[in-house]
Amino acid sequence: MDSVLISEVGPRDGLQSIQSIMPTLDKQAWISALAAAGLREIEVGSFVPPQSLPQMADVAEVVRHAITLPNLTVMALVPNLRGAETALSTGLHKITIPVSASEAHSVANVRKTCADMVNEVRRIVAYRHLHAPQVRIEVGLSTAFGCTLQGPVPEDDVIRLADALARAGVDEIGLSDTTGMANPAQVRRLFVRLRHSIGPLAGAAHLHNTRGLGLANCLAAYEAGVRTFDSSQGGLGGCPYAPGASGNVVTEDMVFMFEAMGINTGIDLRRLMQARAVLHRSLPHEALYGMTPDAGLPLGFVYANGRTCGPHLSPPPSSR
Amino acid sequence: MDSVLISEVGPRDGLQSIQSIMPTLDKQAWISALAAAGLREIEVGSFVPPQSLPQMADVAEVVRHAITLPNLTVMALVPNLRGAETALSTGLHKITIPVSASEAHSVANVRKTCADMVNEVRRIVAYRHLHAPQVRIEVGLSTAFGCTLQGPVPEDDVIRLADALARAGVDEIGLSDTTGMANPAQVRRLFVRLRHSIGPLAGAAHLHNTRGLGLANCLAAYEAGVRTFDSSQGGLGGCPYAPGASGNVVTEDMVFMFEAMGINTGIDLRRLMQARAVLHRSLPHEALYGMTPDAGLPLGFVYANGRTCGPHLSPPPSSR
């Protein structure tokens, strides 16, 4: 049976994109509920200065809780060496570093060129080697499919950057459709090229639903051999442009898609709804997206592993 | 350059699913605006008794207007011979007959077994032969991917029914995910089997977005060789289960997907937004879906035919 790893980014990408600050205990409860639903990898926060992202000020506490949960890879975002130093002291399992494939986006976002960021990553890899060699390092190549500042991003630029980062010693390199500009033909083409260039280091697809193509792009990535997919519960986060235009791919719908196709995710949709309820109770005014939570499961639905269940998911109401 | 035909079903599937009745002049203006945007096939209404669907009482008048528009295939739904007799007297170009692949759905919906429906189709084909041989006949096999009453629908049942309908003399047989239960693996498998069984008679994919998989399923159908896709402007219609859970695939998002992939639709997205504005002005309280209308086009977007345009679509506000 084929299977995929769904990497939940809601507690980081979702919670840092909204105005409200989720209390630490609620974050911990939500992450526990996600893990109980079968999520095996969760991006639990960012190691960034609290004055720039107060939503993430408690990230170390959140990590301390998450690493007590069984069978869970706990990851966090770090933007630079300073963040990595703090992160690697917490006992987490994996860090992820965003590196823009668009020069314009990189300079605007972190005031560093792409080449500067490769050097920063090299310093982080060296630090990891000395202080926490068991921690995995992922790079997510943001704006890999287009940039709102520079427009199209040449595929050669993306692949050249991936090659440089592979040489810098990271463990995984994924591609992110930060701006929701990707289409399935491009996703397939670029992931095939990525795998051709860096082989087993080719990592996750982080795709957005900005223009409604999120799951179609995931399907194309799957067909190109990708087996790790980022998504966010309720579609929280991912820079939505407008009300209703959800950013991140919705975990609930993606789990339904893969399981219905006979591809194992290890995730129980009913328990995933319980995690959604935890999120909704903590942030009752935040819009949660997703179609499967409202529609329930088709009559006669069978999980990839052969398990059956009734159609009703009894979700909390979507707020839209 | 590869291309697809997008068959707009909003004026039929959309308008018959809502409570409001769109005035005849507004229907005509909307259809004109859709045709001006480049839609080459539009399902403009249903020939059903006005007491059962008052929204469709003016279908003959709507057809009379639509057939004056250049380069447009005007089609309408007919449920039975009586509807076909009226339809074929109006000068339209094509009729579409829904036939359930699920026995339970067929009996519940039209009080006829699947075999009865094949006989009805045979009578319609004979009537067409005598009275309007230039009119094309499509059958849409509803519940082809699952049924809310009987659950899974065996793929052998779908193919057997398609074979019987091909022998009955129809021109095209499409598959409809009436209940939004399809997944991409199933869509690909069933359309490949359909083409294998009935060859060039294999027709349109009519897919729903009930669980968020609409465009992923369209992509899978495209990969299985399908080149005609039903969709509805603003996602109107298609039996949505719940607020926010749109039924039909959204024309705007599907056009964006195919054009971004380099597959020609012949549709101009800016003009499609003008048609959306006509719809919105006539039914201001009806929810319109779609992500691309809110997000606009990516910076540097290029149509499949090489034409460029700015990012802004200036849509009317989505109502959600």
Image: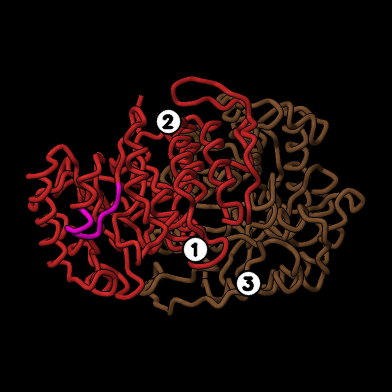
Chain colours: A brown, B red
In the image, is residue A265 part of the stretch drawn in magenta? no
* Cα gap from disc 3 to disc 1, whole angstroms: 23 Å
Q: Which residues are magenta?
A: B76-84
Q: Chain of mark 1?
A: B
Amino acid beneath label 3: Pro
Q: Quickly name the residue at label 3.
A: A317
Where disc 3 sits, the SS reads loop
Where disc 1 sits, the SS reads loop
Q: Quickly name the residue at label 1.
A: B19
Image quarter for residue A210?
top right
Q: Residue furthest right?
A: A51
Amino acid beneath label 2: Gly
Image quarter for residue B150?
bottom left
**Dots 2 and 1: beta carbons under 8 Å?**
no
Amino acid beneath label 1: Gln
Q: Quickly name the residue at label 2.
A: B38
